[in-house]
Image (cartoon, grey):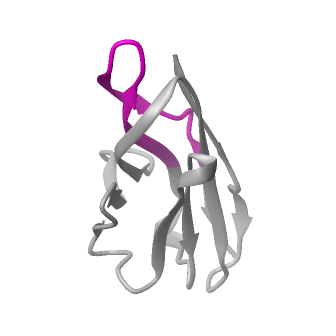
Amino acid sequence: QVQLVESGGGLVQPGGSLRLSCAASGSIFGFNAMAWYRQAPEKERELVAKITSSGITKYGDSVKGRFTISTDNAKNTVYLQMNSLKPEDTAVYYCNAAVVVRGPLRSLDVWGQGTLITVTS
């Protein structure tokens, strides 16, 4: 019904920048919220950033001031701009969306497949 496809992951040096994209496709009426989570090896999945349909944002404490979440509603896409990356940012990053789908209208919680970011010198 709804798919999330992430792109933009990879290898980056400490202090560098990356931008992740997550494009949603399917029978989409709208979004209640879109978010990025991450999971490092042997750690629990944690919220990185979230943005609601009204534009309210929330960030994890460890990324505040360095990461920025934004959306392009016309493209059903959410972005995560990551600056001043640190080795501790190394993780698999997952896109998440609280999607309202058509026919009949209902809410779904959808996850992307994840994209790996490795921060290392």
Closest to the observer, 45 or 23: 23
**Total marks drawn?**
0
**58 vs 66: above or below:** above
Q: Is residue 98 left or right of residue 90?
A: left
Q: Is residue 111 left or right of residue 87?
A: left
Closest to the observer, 101 or 116: 101
Q: Look at the image and say whether residue 81 sits in the magenta stretch.
A: no
Q: What percent of the width, then of the height, locates residue 64?
A: 35, 80
In the rendered image, which quarter contains the C terminus? bottom right
Residue 103 position by quadrant: top left
Q: Is residue 42 left or right of residue 3?
A: left
Residue farthest to the top, as pictured: 103
Closest to the observer, 84 or 14: 84
Q: Residue at x 41, y 30 (%)?
A: 110
**116 vs 105: above or below:** below
Please report the bounds of the magenta region as a residue range.
93-115
Q: Residue at x 63, y 49 (%)?
A: 75
**18 vs 50: above or below:** below
Q: Look at the image and say whether residue 109 sits in the magenta stretch.
A: yes
Tell me which secondary structure the magenta stretch mostly adopts: strand
Q: Residue at x 49, y 66 (%)?
A: 70
Q: What percent of the width, then of the height, locates residue 11?
A: 73, 63
Q: Residue at x 70, y 77 (%)?
A: 13
Q: What percent of the width, then of the height, locates residue 48?
A: 37, 61
Residue 79 position by quadrant: bottom right
Closest to the observer, 9 or 99: 99
Q: What percent of the width, then of the height, locates residue 73?
A: 53, 54
